[in-house]
Structure formats: structure tokens, C-alpha cells
Image (cartoon, coloured by chain):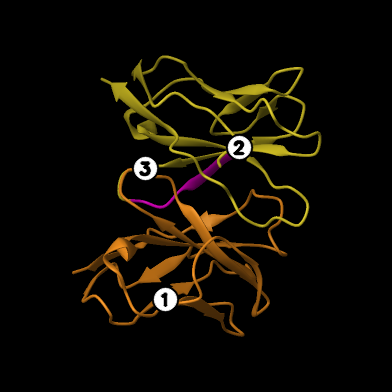
Amino acid sequence: DAKTTQPNSMESNEEEPVHLPCNHSTISGTDYIHWYRQLPSQGPEYVIHGLTSNVNNRMASLAIAEDRKSSTLILHRATLRDAAVYYCIRGLGAGSYQLTFGKGTKLSVIP
Amino acid sequence: ETGVTQSPTHLIKTRGQQVTLRCSSQSGHNTVSWYQQALGQGPQFIFQYYREEENGRGNFPPRFSGLQFPNYSSELNVNALELDDSALYLCASGEGGARSGYGYTFGSGTRLTVV
């Protein structure tokens, strides 16, 4: 049970912003939201994580809804290298060590 | 920083055989986790080792076992292979028990095919 809901696929034009949504309506107050992505033929790669506030790093921005039941990963300018499966992961709860992946969103970037 | 390396990259085994997969953690990381990824699915957590002890396990049978060595490298062993064990096996390393969920570094995986 991944406990998050994401669209199966999305498309974006190169150099345009991309907003990847995630629903986590049953999230608890101490659960972080993590995003990983998996490029073809590679293992997952950490992108960003957050708890309540919006977060920015060199790769992306994470916007978390005020009620924390949803979040959005923002890629400010999509490149061809950003084509990947993006996983939104809720967790980790107390005593839990695992990342629970769902099927993620497959992002295609059109040149 | 050398990242996480896994070996071999590809492997073909026969049903009923045993297999050992290897993982070298990223420098400075003392936690290693193993994941199984079937085609078209997200990775599924198998287990995690922290300072040579298993400290978390997913819903996998006992024929999936592991080891972590003093240099924090790790092995995944699977006995009595079944056809459904065909998958990409991923190793991830992290720091200090890695309970936070971020900072995991994944290897590129070992593709196991059971025939």
C-alpha cells in the first residue's frame, strides 16, 4: 500500500515548467513527503523532501498543500534528461525504515 | 564519492538454484537496503542492514537473506529461486540508520532472470 496517488503519465514540452501532482490524503502529522525519480536503466535518484513548508533545491521545488493532503513537484524548466518515472513517497513512520514506492508518474519530455 | 556499485549487472539462473548479489555502499554510508523491482512496477523493500544487523524487513519469505560486512558492503542471497523472482534488484545506501527517507543513494541494479 503506497498510500499516495499519482497520475500514471504526463507529458511536457522541453524548457517548460512541469507540475507533478501527488495525493496523500491519509498522511499523518509527522510523515515527510519524499520524491525520487528513476531514469531508464538506472536506480531511483533522490529529488527532494519536505514536511510542511515549500522546499527548493537545485533539482526541483516541492509545494505542499496547507492541509498536507497533497503536494506538487515542480521542475522549473524540463529538459530531455528529466524524462523519468517520478515517485512520490509518504513516510517514514516511527520505526519504519523502508521507502514504499507506488507505480509513480512517467514523465515524457517532448523536444 | 564513488556511489553505489552492484554486481553482476545481469544474471540468468535456473529455477531452484541459489544466487548471491553484491553491493558496495557509497563512501561514508553505514546503512544498506535491498529492493526488488518487477517490470513496470515500483521497487519493493526487501530488508535493510545497519551496522551489520538487519533492522527492517519487508514482506519477503525467509529464502531472501542478506549480510552486511564491516566495510558496509552487502550481499543479497536468494535460495530456491522461483520464476517470479525474475526482477531488477536494487541496493541503496544511506547514513546513520537512514530512517529519514532522504539521502538514499541507489545503485543501477542487478537484472536477474530465472528460467
Residue neighbourhood size for the residue with mark 3, other residues' Cα within 10 Å, grouped as few (<14), some (14–19), many (≥20) = some
Earlier in the chain: of badge 2 and badge 3, it is 3
Residue at image coords 80%, 39%: A30
Residue identifier under label 2: A48
Residue identifier under label 3: A39
Answer above or below: position of A98 versus A62.
below
In three-dimensional space, the C-alpha distance between marks 2 and 3, rounded to whole angstroms, equals: 16 Å
Locate residue B38, reporting x and y percent: 35, 52
Q: Secondary structure at mark 2?
A: strand
- Chain on which label 3 sits: A
Whether residue B37 sits left or right of residue A61 in the image: it is: left
Answer above or below: position of B73 versus A73.
below
Name chain B's colour: orange
Of all chains in the rendering, the one displayed in yellow is: A
Residue at image coords 39%, 27%: A8
Q: Do residues under tags 3 and 1 come within 8 Å of each other at their CB atoms?
A: no
Residue type beneath disc 3: Leu
Residue at image coords 70%, 18%: A65
Residue A19 visible from this viewpoint? yes
Q: Which residues are magenta?
A: A42-47
Instruction: Indicate the quadrant where residue B71 lies.
Output: bottom right
Number of callouts in the render? 3
**Between A2 and A68, the one nearer to me in the picture:** A2
